[in-house]
Image (cartoon, coloured by chain):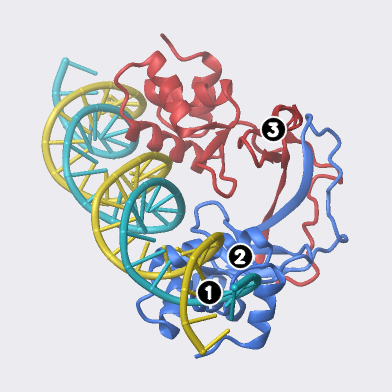
Chain colours: A red, B blue, C yellow, D cyan
DNA sequence: CCCGTTGTCTTGACTCATTCCAGAAAAGCG
DNA sequence: CGCTTTTCTGGAATGAGTCAAGACAACGGG
């Protein structure tokens, strides 16, 4: 299976070589927001059996470095990846099942990005994570 | 060495047994904000040589469950612990050296805690992490 | 003050995500 | 089409964190 023109274009736009493995990884992340590494690996192997896990890890790192995907890693969870980049959105994480959903920031494009005291840090990003219980887990508990 | 009365009181107040190991763990976290597990382990062994790492892990989990310490885990970092709880402050993390500093929230007690769309999640906490470069690393780079 | 109960600590093995390494293969350029 | 550079494969290693069973200590009742 050929990578879609969009994927090829995205990779070339980031000055990355277009390899089948890399394209499959990017496609998998695009198709499955917030997928963890293992999910991505299995999705890629659906397309390209025999791909090594190392290729997936490496591709994810490369894509992350190029800004095509974003790595998120809520405390106590394995790394997850998403392809929605550059729009400063945030995440809700379920304390019970670990599922993740997107949240558009309620207060503007760069919330709380002006802390009162920066302790000499040069801050370039503010990341917001909401913690709670997802609908499914909440329902399961009350039932 | 005896645990200080404050530590004993804190533990009893949380309905936890006052063991020497546990008191030493709590004292270590109080003395070293944002210490990672290994740092805590070594600090505890300064007081009580021969403590098992398991006791430290277990104490940290218990204290976290009791709300006496808070566990923070920025992406790509090992778990860190701090004793400042209940005041909804946030953190800056240095991308270069991983050091952490406290930030009092600039916009109030519960920033951005009302997302526009909650996807069925019941949210109970908003965590904010600022990413940037600390003074030392910034100076090292320009030198 | 001593004893039993209950919860904690020790010891040591183990899991599993992630990384490291060296050789093989493929992409892209001329 | 062949060369160079980058990427991929396969396998082993690393290391934070967890599991389990038995020894031990804290604390409330006698």
Specify the quadrant of the image occupied by residue B138: bottom right
Horizontally, residue D15 falls left or right of residue A125, namely: left
Q: Position of residue B111 (x, y in %)?
A: 83, 54
Give the residue at x 58% y 50%.
A75
**Disc 1 secondary structure class:** helix
Across and down, in percent, residue A99 comes to: 63, 33
Q: Chain of mark 1?
A: B
Is residue A37 visible to the viewer in this orientation of the structure? yes
Residue A107 position, x and y percent, is 87, 46
Considering the numbered disc 3 on the image, is that residue within a helix, a strand or a loop?
Answer: strand
Give the quadrant of residue A60: top left
Q: Earlier in the sequence, mark 2 or mark 1?
A: 1
| Mark 2 lies on residue | B63
Q: CA gap, disc 3 to disc 1? A: 35 Å
In the image, residue A20 above or below residue B82: above
Give left or right: position of B121 versus D16.
right
Q: Decide: marks 3, 1 in contact (CB < 8 A)? A: no
Specify the label residue A101 is tagged with: 3
Kindly identify the residue that appears in the image at 58 percent across and 66 percent down: B81
- Disc 3 or disc 1, which is closer to the eye? 1
Residue A19 visible to an observer of this rendering: no
Q: Chain of mark 3?
A: A
Q: Nearer the viewer, mark 2 or mark 3?
A: 2
Residue at which label 1 appears? B25
């Amino acid at each position: 299976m050929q990578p879609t023109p969009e994927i090829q274009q995205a990779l070339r736009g980031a000055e990355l070589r277009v390899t089948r493995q890399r394209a499959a990884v990017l496609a998998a992340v695009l198709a499955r927001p917030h997928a963890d590494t293992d999910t991505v690996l299995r999705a890629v192997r659906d397309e390209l059996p025999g791909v090594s896990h190392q290729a997936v890890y490496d591709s994810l790192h490369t894509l992350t470095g190029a800004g095509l995907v974003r790595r998120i890693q809520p405390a106590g969870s394995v790394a997850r990846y998403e392809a929605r980049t550059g729009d400063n959105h945030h995440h809700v994480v379920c304390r019970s099942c670990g599922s993740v959903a997107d949240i558009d920031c309620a207060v503007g494009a760069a919330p709380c990005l002006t802390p009162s005291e920066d302790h000499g840090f040069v801050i370039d990003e503010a990341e917001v994570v909401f913690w709670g219980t997802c609908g499914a887990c909440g329902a399961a508990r009350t039932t």
